[in-house]
Image (spheres, rainbow, N blue to C red):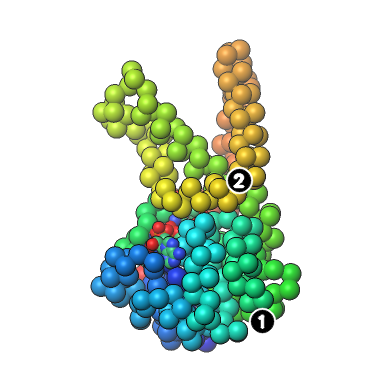
Amino acid sequence: MSAAPFRHVAVIGLGLLGGSVLRAVQQYLPDSVTTGYDADAGVRARAREIALAGTVADSASEAVTGADLVVLCVPVGAMGAAAKAMASGLSPQTLVTDVGSSKASVMAQLGEALPGHPVIPSHPVAGTEQSGPDAGFATLFRNRWCIVTPPEDADAAQVAALNAFWEALGARVETMDPEHHDRVLAVTSHLPHLIAYTIVGTASDLEEVTQSEVIKYSAGGFRDFTRIAASDPTMWRDVFLSNREAVLEMLQRFTEDLTELQKAIRKRDGDALFDHFARTRAIRRGIIEMGQDDARPDFGRSDHNGSG
Ligand SMILES: NC(=O)C1=CN([C@@H]2O[C@H](COP(=O)(O)OP(=O)(O)OC[C@H]3O[C@@H](n4cnc5c(N)ncnc54)[C@H](O)[C@@H]3O)[C@@H](O)[C@H]2O)C=CC1
Ligand SMILES: O=C(O)C(=O)Cc1ccc(O)cc1
C-alpha cells in the first residue's frame, strides 16, 4: 500500500474491535490521523492513558469531525444510536463503515440513522473472547477475512478505498450481500457460540458433577467451549437478537442432526457414528489445508509485511 486510503480515521466504540482498528492503523497506516470516542467515560479515560487514538474526543460528533472514514465498533444493537449521535459532525463525503457481526440489521439501522449518507458495512471475521480497550491488538486482522457488504448504489471508488483499508490492515476482503452474510455467519459463528453458551451452562447445572470436577477435567473438549462461552454478553445478546431468523433456521437444522446422532447412539449404530465422525474429520483437515487454522504456530505470520 503506497498511500493511506483514508487520511483521517475515526473510531466509535473503543473496545476489542475499535482498539484493534486504531492500533492497526497506527502500525500499518502511520500517516493517517486517528480519533476515537466511546460512550463510557471510563473507557475514554483508559483509551487516553494507553494512547489508543491520536485524540479521544468527549463527543461522537467531535470525534468524527474532519474524518474521511468512520468505523463504528459498538455492539450491533447500538449501531443506530451511535450513528445518530455522531451525525452532526459528519461531512457529506465521510464514508461510514462498521465491524458488526450481523449485517442486514446494521444496514437497516444505519440507513435509518444516516439517510442518504455513504455507508458500506464491513465484518472483519476476527476476534477473541476478550472485550474492552486493553483487549485490542494491531495484528488482529492479519490473514483474516473481512466481509464487505456494499449497498447496490455504493460508489465504486469508495468500495475500492474501503477494501484497500482492510487490506492495509492485513485482511483478505470478500464481498457479499448482507442476507447471505447473515446465513453464513449464523452457521459458522453464531450457532457455535450458542452451543458453547449452552454446554457450559449445562455442565455447571449438573448436581452430580461438582464445579471442581468440571474445572479439573476440562481438557476433555470442554475447555475450548469455556473460552467461547466467556465472550461478551452484551455483544452476543445483540448478535442473536439481530440475526434471529438465520440463527433459528440453523438451530433447527442442528437440532435435527443432533437427533440423528442421538438415534444412532440409542440404536448402537456404530457405522452411522463412524461415518459421521469420518466426514467431519475430513472437513477439519480441509480447513487446515486452506490455511484457515489459527492454531498453527505460524498462522498469520507468513504473507503480510507489517511488523509485530
Ligand atoms: N469481539 C469479537 O470477537 C468481534 C466483535 N465484532 C463486532 O464488533 C463490535 C464491537 O465488539 P467488541 O469490540 O468486541 O466489543 P467491546 O465490548 O470490547 O467494545 C464495545 C464498546 O462500544 C462502546 N459503546 C456501546 N454503545 C456505544 C455507543 N452508542 N456509542 C459509543 N460507544 C458505545 C462500549 O462502551 C464499549 O467500550 C460488535 O458489533 C461485534 O459484533 C466483530 C468481530 C469480532
Ligand atoms: O473468539 C473467537 O473464536 C471468535 O469467534 C471471535 C469472533 C467473534 C465474533 C465475530 O463476528 C467474529 C469473530
Circle 1: residue type: Ala
Residue 132 higher or lower than 167, as above or below: above
Q: Position of residue 32 (x, y in %)?
A: 45, 84
Q: Position of residue 156 (x, y in %)?
A: 70, 78
- Ligand 1: does it lie within 8 Å of the C-beta at label 1? no
Q: Earlier in the sequence, mark 1 or mark 2?
A: 1
**Residue at mark 2:** 244
- Indicate the position of residue 232 as horizontal and vertical percent values: 41, 50
The crowding category of the residue bearing disc 1, from other C-alpha atoms within 10 Å (few below 14, some 14 to 19, many at least 20), is few
Q: Nearer the viewer, mark 1 or mark 2?
A: 2
Q: CA distance from mark 1 to mark 2?
A: 33 Å
Q: Residue at x 29, y 32 (%)?
A: 215
Residue farthest to the top, as pictured: 267
Q: x%, y% of residue 116? A: 67, 76
Give the quarter of the image for residue 17.
bottom left
Q: In the rendered view, tell whether residue 224 sits above or below residue 174.
A: above
Question: Is residue 134 shown left or right of residue 261?
Answer: left
How many residues crowd mark 2 within 10 Å: few (<14), some (14–19), many (20+)?
few
- Decide if residue 161 is on the left or right side of residue 308: right
Residue drawn at x 49%, y 60% is 78
Residue that badge 1 annotates: 157
> What SS does tag 1 mark?
helix
> Relative to 75, is 215 on the left or the right?
left
Q: Which of these two is toward me, 12 or 54?
A: 12
In the rendered view, tell whether residue 167 sits above or below residue 231: below
Query: Could you tell me which quadrant the C terminus lies in?
Result: bottom left
In this view, 285 is above or below 27: above
* In front of the other: 259 or 289: 259
Three-letter amino acid code of the residue under disc 2:
Arg
* Residue drawn where x is 35% and y is 81% of the image: 54
Can residue 173 be seen here? The reply is no
